[in-house]
Image (cartoon, rainbow, N blue to C red):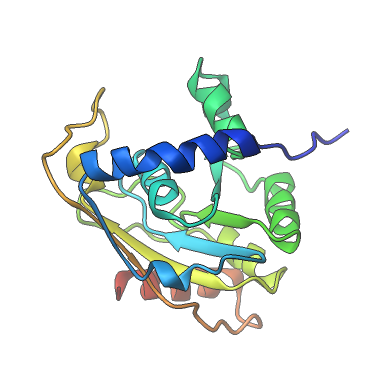
Amino acid sequence: MEEKFYYSKAGYQIWFKIRPIFKSLLRIKVEGIENIPLENGCILASNHRSNLDPFVLNTVSPRPIFFMAKQELFKVPILGWLIKKAGAIPVKRNKRDIGALKKTVSLLNEGYCVGIFPEGTRAKPGEFRKPQSGIGLIVSKTDSPVIPVKIEGTDLIYPAGSKFPKIGKSTIKVKIGKPIKINKEMDYSDIAEYIMENIKQL
C-alpha cells in the first residue's frame, strides 16, 4: 500500500517564523516573489548547483515547497527525518521512477507547490546540465503552471564536497520568473529543454 503523503504543518509554521534569520545570514536577495501563486498547484523549476538550493527556496517562498529528493537521503540520520517532515518526495535514482512522478502529479492536482530541478543533479559552478525528461512528463499530466527560477551563489557558499556552508562568502541571488506557456504536445525532452532555456534566460 502506498504511503500517504505527509508533512508537518506545525513545523512549517515554526519555520516561517524563524527563516528571516537564515535569509539574513545567507544574504539572500530575491526578485519576482510575486510570481509564485499563493493558492493551487504550481511547479517551481529551478537550476541546481548546491544541496543548499531547496533550503534557500523554502526560505524565500510565501508557501511550502515540496521537493523531489533521492531516496538515499531519507535514510540519513536527522536529515531523513527533516526532509520527510518537510514533505519531500523520495525518488529512486538511475532509472525513471514512475511512482514518484505519479505522486508528484497527484500533489500538484491537489493544490501543492512542488519544486523540481530539471537537471536532476547538481551542475558545476556557473554551469547548467542537460535537463532530464521527467519534468516534461509531469508537466504534460497536469494543468499546474510552471514558474522558472534561477539561483546563483549557493555553489560558492556550499559547493559539492564541502562539509559545512561558508556563510558570508557570497550573496545568494534568487530570480523568479513569470509562469511560462508550454505546448504539451511536444516530446517530454523538448518540454524539459524549453523549461531549462527559460531558467537560463532569467
Q: Is residue 55 left or right of residue 105?
A: left
Spot occupied by residue 67 in the image (x, y as percentages of width and height): 54, 46
Of the pair 117 and 145, the residue shown nearer to us: 145
- Quadrant for the C terminus, please: bottom left
- Which residue lies most toward the top here? 77
Spot occupied by residue 131 in the image (x, y as percentages of width and height): 44, 61
Spot occupied by residue 159 in the image (x, y as percentages of width and height): 23, 37
- Quadrant for the N terminus, please: top right
Q: Is residue 91 left or right of residue 192?
A: right
Spot occupied by residue 22 in the image (x, y as percentages of width and height): 30, 39
116 versus 149 height, above or below: above
- Which residue lies most toward the left here? 169
Residue drawn at the location 71% of the way across and 58% of the way down: 105
Of the pair 157 and 93, the residue shown nearer to us: 157
Residue drawn at the location 26% of the way across and 22% of the way down: 163
Residue 70 is at least partly visible in this image: no
- The quarter holding residue 29 reads bottom left
Residue drawn at the location 49% of the way across and 80% of the way down: 180
Of the pair 109 and 127, the residue shown nearer to us: 109
34 versus 1 height, above or below: below
